[in-house]
Amino acid sequence: MAIDLGAAGGRNRRNARRTAPKSDNVYLKLLVKLYKFLHRRTDSKFNKVVLKRLFMSKTNKPPLSLSKLAKFMEGKDGKIAVLVGTITDDVRMYDVPKMRVCALRFTQTARQRILKAGGECLTFDQLALIAPTGAGTVLLRGPKLSREAVKHFGRATGVPDSNTKPFVRSKGRKFEKARGRRASRGYKC
């Protein structure tokens, strides 16, 4: 008789989702405790999603800039923007609109600019008191695939139609510009 090792209910099946954060941050653990309670006691999907995102790794909690935040909150006056991650400043943005934002972290300048515009920076425990079910909130995420590392993923760099960024020391004349890269050096593909 064989042992069922497959994913269809075998004894070696593993649930790959996190059930707790890997971080030792006590404040994060307190937030997890709070949102576990809210998820259990309310039938709100918002609390379930926030709890799941609190467990996530740093890569899966990408930061969101003030300019992107302002763009997403256009026409959503009176609502609270919620991001399980960091809000960062964007120096290219001249005027910051007034908005209420809840996030795990704010960079120093981002916090200053939101407050200066007459907005409000909230923590998740404050949000739990204001909107325990997530009513009147807009749940946002940062751009996950904007990391420098992601540019190097994909088809091999020399392959036709590949837009993958090569790991090159420098972008000069002497670096990866020989055969196959210039018509004057044998061939160009």
Image (cartoon, helix red, strand yellow):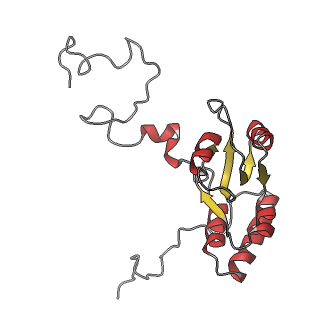
Q: Is residue 30 above or below residue 83?
A: below
Q: Position of residue 155 (x, y in %)?
A: 32, 41
Q: Is residue 44 above or below residue 157?
A: below
Q: Nearer the viewer, residue 31 or 10?
A: 31
Residue at image point 44% right, 81% down: 10
Q: Position of residue 2 (x, y in %)?
A: 35, 84
Residue 129 in sight:
yes
Q: Position of residue 158 (x, y in %)?
A: 29, 31
Q: Residue furthest left?
A: 187
Residue at image point 68% right, 77% down: 39
Q: Nearer the viewer, residue 146 or 44?
A: 44
Q: Is residue 120 above or below residue 5?
A: above
Residue 55 in sight:
no
Quadrant of image for the N terminus: bottom left
Q: Nearer the viewer, residue 115 or 7?
A: 115
Rendered image quadrant of residue 3: bottom left
